[in-house]
Amino acid sequence: MEFRETLLSSFRTLRSHKMRSALTMLGIVIGSGALVAVMSMIAGLNQSVSAQFQSIGTDIISVSKYPWIQMGDSEDFRNRKDITLADAEAVGRLPSVGLMAPNIHTRRNIAYGGETVRYTLVTGSTAEYETIDNYLVDSGRFITNLDDDRHRASVVLGADVAEELFHLRDPLGHDIKVGGKRFTVVGVMEAKGDIFGESLDDLVIIPITTFQKAFGRRRSVVIDCSPADGVSMQRTMEEIRQLLRIRRQVPRNDPDDFAINTQSDLVSGYNALTGVLYMAMVGIVGLALLVGGIGVMNVMLVSVAERTREIGVRKAIGARRRDITLQFLVESVILTGLGGGLGILGGSAIAFLVKAATPLPAAVTPTAVILAASFALVTGLTFGVYPATRAGRLNPMEALRYE
Amino acid sequence: MLIELEGLSKIYEVGTQEVRALSDINMTVAENEYLAIMGPSGSGKSTLMNIIGCLDTPTEGSYRLKGQEVGSLDDDELAEIRSTEIGFVFQTFNLLPRMTAFQNVELPLIYGRAARKVRTDRVWETIDAVGLKDRAHHRPSELSGGQRQRVALARALINQPSILLADEPTGNLDSTTGEEIMQIFRQLNQAGNTIILVTHEQYIAEHARRIVRLLDGRISSDTVS
Ligand SMILES: Nc1ncnc2c1ncn2[C@@H]1O[C@H](COP(=O)(O)OP(=O)(O)OP(=O)(O)O)[C@@H](O)[C@H]1O
Ligand SMILES: [Mg+2]
């Protein structure tokens, strides 16, 4: 039979059983919807995370008390000794280390005139921080070694802070209050944008020595550094490890009581996370499609039984096995195809909602849509084959006698 | 010879029991014959029609259609014969309820793989021939019994079959409507069609020129008037 006729006839049948068709599609709708939604979210996650990764740089080693990705007991981490500025300076003197910028952080209110920005990140560091952590100065200058040596009360403003305190005026040379202490603005940084909905520009940077004087020394230092020219990451990290183990008197067979973080740790941690998401999705989608497929098979078997007489009539007027088989197969594929289409729409709607309501830039990818559509169609084919073949094989005379 | 039946039997197995629906049928039908099959209920009339119409195959004996042995054909070859050589009319019309009269009549052409242009013209021609032009786009449920049987007749004729088989075509119709259908059969036979029909009614059978009577699956008489 001509394909167009098969198609039309299939639509006619499905339309005459709207409720049943809709229920059957449900599993397929859920399966393909979940696939599109999860893949869209992972795509969004990829996008924002890769931006964050790029902001870190592949050759940065960051030594801190806490690992970037924590697995296990956080009590353990909290009981660790703080990393000191002296530790950082010792690391900086290692021949395998190129640039080094110690940094410490707190959150304070920043005020100028009548304006206050609350609970803003205050970072204490050195001139090298500009290069290592990739900050660009928009006007004025970054903090310098001289600032640091003389414990000057200099401050560089993040773009957001500058905007909120000074609006359109020029902040350079003005005195502001950082945690109640007076600081002079020496520079404003370029805007970096945001990640996961959090602005990277809502901070101020001051000299690390000034920081310690103003806000105390009892804070663990983060050591950001890069390998010296021609030295591998591995070797640099190993030397830092050995040095810190000695300085911190870690017993021979104990694990490190500090963490050496690199971008690749983030990447692998991230991959583990998306791996789990993918597995969960494969589970949901597989199950939903299986349930949907069994539903489709069931409905098609019922449909074949109900239409036994019709099959007999069609055969009596010249339909061959494959005409009948194809008709039922097309019906089953249309059923799952429509289900897949609805699922794709639903999944995309979820993705758009997530994008609008959360910081995650969920994005519907063509791959997800194609995958969902193919899975739906393949499910229809797979689970339609048995009922369709059975319909095709019916003996015409017996089919006609069927009551 | 159009149809040759030789020592033909049909045995149904129901559980462990054997039902002999037809026993040792010998009969020939020439082209352009008009034949009525009669007999009491359960005598095997429908079984014989179904075998002649290639909906079923004999258990024993031979059935040759236009010289070709039908018993040895596979499913698709039988479908091909049904498509090109046989036109069926049933007591209960057996129209597809979700399709219009036009679509029902068109269906055998689609299975016969005729081009759409050819189909449309042929369907109109045939529907016109049974006098249903103004009902072409109605569904079976919107037609009277007589009209439905005309649609069924048009569907049976659309592929210009060698044999028109009708199993109690007037069984569900009142006598006037039945008579109208029989008029069409007569015209078709005069135009050269071969017709075999099953009936319980003597006055319907008398339209035919030859009457074969069955009793318990055997031919009990074969008379030409
Ligand atoms: N598929 C089948 N399975 C088992 N027995 C069958 C089958 N088809 C027909 N029979 C038996 O074969 C015999 C002949 O049946 P058939 O339908 O040919 O009779 P009929 O002459 O057409 O009767 P009626 O006038 O009532 O239509 C009956 O005894 C019937 O029970
Ligand atoms: Mg009968």
Image (cartoon, coloured by chain):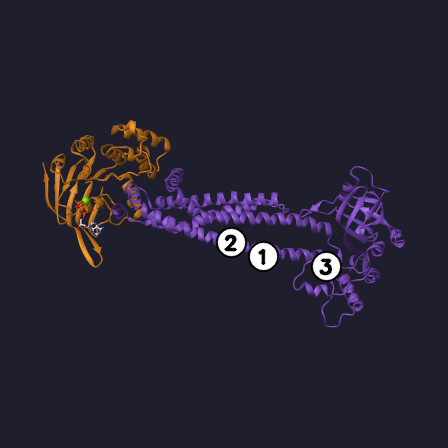
Q: Which residue is mark 1?
A: A276
Q: Which chain is purple?
A: A
The one nearer the camera, A76 or A191, is A76
Secondary structure, mark 2, is helix
For disc 3, the neighbor class at 10 Å (few under 14, some 14 to 19, many from 20) is some
Q: Position of residue B45 (x, y in %)?
A: 17, 45
Give me the C-alpha separation between circle 1 and circle 2: 12 Å
Instruction: Tell me what residue is drawn at x 48 percent, y 54 percent.
Output: A287
The one nearer the camera, A40 or A402, is A40
* Circle number at residue A284: 2
> What is the chain letter for disc 2?
A
For disc 1, the neighbor class at 10 Å (few under 14, some 14 to 19, many from 20) is few
Q: Position of residue A38 (x, y in %)?
A: 56, 50
As drawn, the residue found furthest toward the bottom would be A252
Instruction: Tell me what residue is drawn at x 67 percent, y 60 percent.
Output: A70
Q: Position of residue A119 (x, y in %)?
A: 75, 50
Let me know if marks 1 and 2 both belong to one chain. yes
Confirm if mark 2 falls within 8 A of ligand 1. Answer: no
Tell me the amino acid under the disc marked 2: Ile
Which quarter of the figure is the N terminus of chain A placed in? top left
Quarter where residue B67 is shown: top left
Q: Position of residue B166 (x, y in %)?
A: 21, 39
Tell me the amino acid under the disc marked 3: Asn
* Circle number at residue A261: 3
Sequence-wise, the earlier of marks 1 and 2 is 1
Quarter where residue A112 is shown: top right
Let me know if marks 3 and 2 both belong to one chain. yes
Give me the C-alpha separation between circle 3 and circle 2: 34 Å
Sequence-wise, the earlier of marks 1 and 3 is 3
Q: Which chain is orange?
A: B
Tell me the amino acid under the disc marked 1: Val
